[in-house]
Image (cartoon, grey):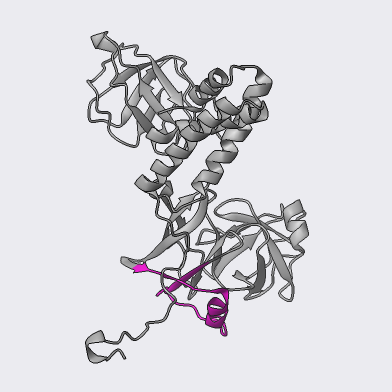
Amino acid sequence: MKSYTTLRNLYGDDTKDSTSENLTYGDEIMNDFHRRLLAKADWPFLHRTRIITSVAPLTTFTGATNDLCTVTGDTINIETGVEVVLTTTDTLPAGLATSTRYFMIWQSATTFNLATTKANAFAGTVVDITDTGTGTHTLTLAVQDNFQPLPHDIDQVESVFVIVSSTRFPLTPAPSKTFWDKLHYSSYNSDTPEYWFVEDARIKIWPRLISDGNVISIDGKIRVADLNIADYTTGTVDIATNGSIELTGSGTTWTQPMVGRWIRITHSDTASAAGDGVWYEINAVESSTVLTLRRPYGGTSLTTGASAAYIIGQMPLLPEAYHDIIEQYGAFRHWSKEKDADRALLFRTMVETGVADLFNTYAVEDLTMVIDDGFEDFLINPNLTINL
């Protein structure tokens, strides 16, 4: 595998120019090509499963004179800017009214503020609440079409299922906006979901789920982040047990942003400190000296005091055999800019060969999210027909 640092160094070597200006130019070119290449097909290696939870159509809450509202039973996973209405069994907190539509300002899973306009919500201008009111207060979504923000790194949704109690419901993608709108001729809530639809970076489910906190599992193609993080090598690996996902470091400062990067314990001739030289994706960082891997460590166990060298690197999302394609493309662009036709042609040929092989090996060239038009067509048995 080739990390960002390795690719950057290779680009400097291949372009015979390791100046900061040229390396920064290479970063931009390589990231653009990386992102564009991964948008060309439905790559199976880009698929991840992400989990969100359903939001009930309504929830009860209390208001306080610090202007913060607190839910009294459910969590409140409604994003800032969503329009809501309020009702009460007696009197709303002073400053709020039942005849007014408000806009959410999300603060936490159990707290929120309210604003009088969407612009105010995004600006953080809250409604002034001067007392707690009396009775039971209820917040309801003004438009109940069950939309929720997509997980931040999902680019394209492929499939969705929802777990309600112990029942797993696989959902069907709505084939069009027209079809989706027809489903909403009237308001309908149920804990038996049937369809999903994506619009404006939100996922919507029909019918709207009545209960809160149901697991919504989304399988999708993830977005491509820029490669810009240098290799991290501070400290050593102290403990690595064969078959375990946990690594313990010494003198390390491992941090949460390292999740998703890759670690390799250096292979060497020193038996007590030799890793297997294989890259492992980091699944979680438990502390500054403890992290866990997505797959169990496969090398010979290292015990306390091993002091094994290691590298943590940010990797392209391509399969490891094709990491060098983006660096070769950067070199091609550099030599094209320098009007060196021979070198440009050499790197262009390497890129074209690598890309063709990548498509032949991995590509599923179907980017549509609709796998069914939503209607069952009648199939005629060809044995019962005559072709003229």
Pick the quarter of the image with the N terminus.
top left
**Residue 246 in view, yes or no:** yes
Pick the quarter of the image with the C terminus.
bottom left
Q: Is residue 140 above or below residue 335?
A: below
- Horizontal side of 276 relative to 113 (left or right) equals left
Residue 48 in the image: state x and y as whole percent.
41, 49
Residue 28 in the image: state x and y as whole percent.
63, 33
- Horizontal side of 94 relative to 167 (left or right) equals right
Q: Residue furthest top?
A: 270
Residue 296 in the image: state x and y as whole percent.
27, 33
Of 255 and 50, which appears nearest the observer? Answer: 50
Specify the quadrant of the image occupied by residue 199.
bottom right
Count of marks overlaid on the render: 0
Of 317 and 271, which appears nearest the observer? Answer: 317
- Horizontal side of 187 relative to 131 (left or right) equals left
Residue depicted at x 65% and y 57%: 80
- Which residues are the magenta region? 169-197
Residue depicted at x 45% and y 18%: 252
Specify the quadrant of the image occupied by residue 269.
top left
Residue 142 in the image: state x and y as whole percent.
64, 73
Q: Is residue 170 magenta?
A: yes
Residue depicted at x 61% and y 34%: 29
Residue depicted at x 51% and y 21%: 10
Q: Is residue 36 magenta?
A: no
Of 6 and 361, which appears nearest the observer? Answer: 361
Of 141 and 63, which appears nearest the observer? Answer: 141
Q: Is residue 357 above or below residue 244?
A: below
- Horizontal side of 195 relative to 177 (left or right) equals left
**Residue 283 in view, yes or no:** no
